[in-house]
Image (cartoon, rainbow, N blue to C red):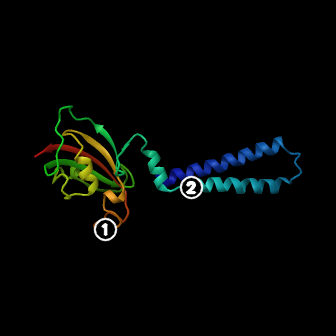
Amino acid sequence: MRFTTQIIIGSLLLIGSAAAFNLSMNNNNNNGATSASTRRDFLKSSSAVAASSLILPNKALAESDYTDYITTESGMKYKVTKEAPEDAAVPIAGQTVKAHYTGWLDDFNSEKKFDSSRDRGRPFTFKVGTGQVIRGWDEAFSTMKVGERRNIVLPPRLAYGERGAGGIIPPGATLYFDVELLGIL
């Protein structure tokens, strides 16, 4: 999806550049340069601008997509999508929690969903802050209230790092999760 957007933007830049050139040629025909060489020079510089928009790193695009998210000191990004009651409990390290989650590669709701407790209809349980789960989950769930739901974006160092996982998570993958803290057991 992002790649398609990049192609569209690049194409629009090229079309806009060509239109700008034609307008400038109509208004500036007295500069002594031939129309063909001026057009070639103009398109070369325009192509460079368009090409640079196509090769922007996905990281730069991803960061701009999540401007309304909170970024923690570790680099995790999150957005609360369902507030918990104000007096709801927050788990402490060592407590067992029950949670629902859905995880994706590439972005939320992409076609690359890799796991979901919701799809199985069975919540996941684990001890918070003890290393039973990836670092990003320990961090996220240790600050959530019971009943809260969040979208979290985990950079590789908070997920499976450069090793990946089980042939499903590629090395160096950023992971996208919709998580919900259902209870403390």
Q: Position of residue 165 (x, y in %)?
A: 29, 65
Residues packed near mark 2 inside 10 Å, few (<14), some (14 to 19) or many (20 plus): some
Q: Residue furthest front?
A: 73
Q: Residue furthest top?
A: 86
- Residue ID at (50%, 55%): 3
Which residue in the protein does label 1 denote? Answer: 167
Amino acid on which disc 1 is placed: Gly
Q: Earlier in the sequence, mark 1 or mark 2?
A: 2
Between residue 38 and residue 63, name the one nearer to us.
63
- Residue ID at (55%, 58%): 55
Q: CA distance from mark 1 to mark 2?
A: 29 Å
Between residue 89 and residue 12, name the one nearer to us.
89
Which residue in the protein does label 2 denote? Answer: 54
122 left or right, relative to 26: left
128 in relation to 183, above or below: below
133 in relation to 83, above or below: below
Q: Position of residue 84 (x, y in %)?
A: 22, 35
